[in-house]
Amino acid sequence: MAPCRPGSRSFVVPWAATLLLALGAERALALPEICMLCPGSVRDLSQVTLYCKQTPELMLHSRCCLNQEGTIVGLDLQNCSLKDPGPNFPQAHTAVIIDLQANPLKDDFAKTFRGFTQLQTLILPQDVSCPGGINAWNTVTFYKNNQTCQGQRNLCNSTGDQEMCPENGSCVPDGPGLMECVCADGFHGYKCMRQGSFSLVMFFGILGSTTLSISILLWGTQRRKAKTP
């Protein structure tokens, strides 16, 4: 049998296979932590699986449905014995569909979904209210073992208060039943009343000068105490 030389084809093939395995392992390590919050994979008949298989570009990994860029568009954490979604839950803020049924979740976790502006379908245990309340969703459907919050409403469009945000600010949605006021370009500060760009140079200059003054004052105080018999 001929020896495996670096320039031969028999040497290139196993080297390429090793490289592909290494790249695959690196990609697996890059999977968001929330996708591995509990063991197992997405169930075949879950709503997340059905949603993910509707689009060929989407793929299932552990408990997540990801697009080709690795962004989470679906998350299935049903039956994971969760009392709350955990600190890594914001990693799924891009999700369109999330399944949290069959978990002993706390009833009030509205702020948990801050930033989840793309969420359109949320499946929860029957005794847990939809975040933001029923007015934050187009439809809330109750089933025997769960409930589905469907179609997140834009709070900025549904409110009748035209003065919710200041004159130089605008309302933007920030999750189910949540909103925030964002200053228009060229305005910042309290109620967006300050005009002009925020000067980082001035801010850090003032901060540095203040810190230096306090340091000199403390140094002088300690030096006087050291000289006192």
Image: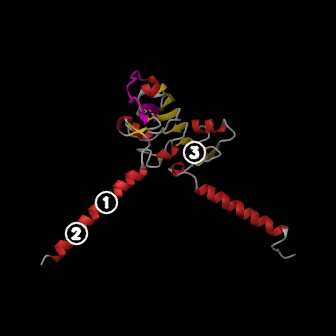
Q: Which mark is residue 64?
A: 3
As drawn, 161 above or below 174 = above
Residue 179 in the figure: left or right of residue 12: left
Which residue occupies the foreground of this view, 177 or 2? 177
Q: Earlier in the sequence, mark 1 or mark 3?
A: 3
Residue kind at label 1, given as amino acid type:
Thr
Residue 149 in the figure: left or right of residue 9: left
Q: Residues within 10 Å of mark 1 (few under 14, many from 20)?
A: few
Residue annotated with mark 2: 220
Give the CA separation, mark 2 to mark 1. Answer: 14 Å
Q: Is residue 18 among what the camera can see?
A: yes
Q: Quadrant of the N terminus?
A: bottom right
Q: Position of residue 155 (x, y in %)?
A: 44, 28
Which residue occupies the foreground of this view, 227 or 24? 227
Residue kind at label 2, given as amino acid type:
Gly
Residue annotated with mark 1: 211
Q: Are marks 2 and 1 in contact (CB under 8 Å)?
A: no
Q: Is residue 1 among what the camera can see?
A: no
Q: Is residue 1 magenta?
A: no
Q: Secondary structure at mark 1?
A: helix
Q: Residues within 10 Å of mark 2 (few under 14, many from 20)?
A: few
Q: Earlier in the sequence, mark 2 or mark 1?
A: 1
Q: Residue at x 44, y 43 (%)?
A: 197
Q: Position of residue 69 (x, y in %)?
A: 63, 47
Q: Secondary structure at mark 3?
A: strand
Range drawn in magenta: 159-182
Q: Residue at x 52, y 38 (%)?
A: 98
The image shows a total of numbered marks equal to 3
Q: Are marks 1 and 3 in contact (CB under 8 Å)?
A: no
Give the CA separation, mark 1 to mark 3. Answer: 47 Å
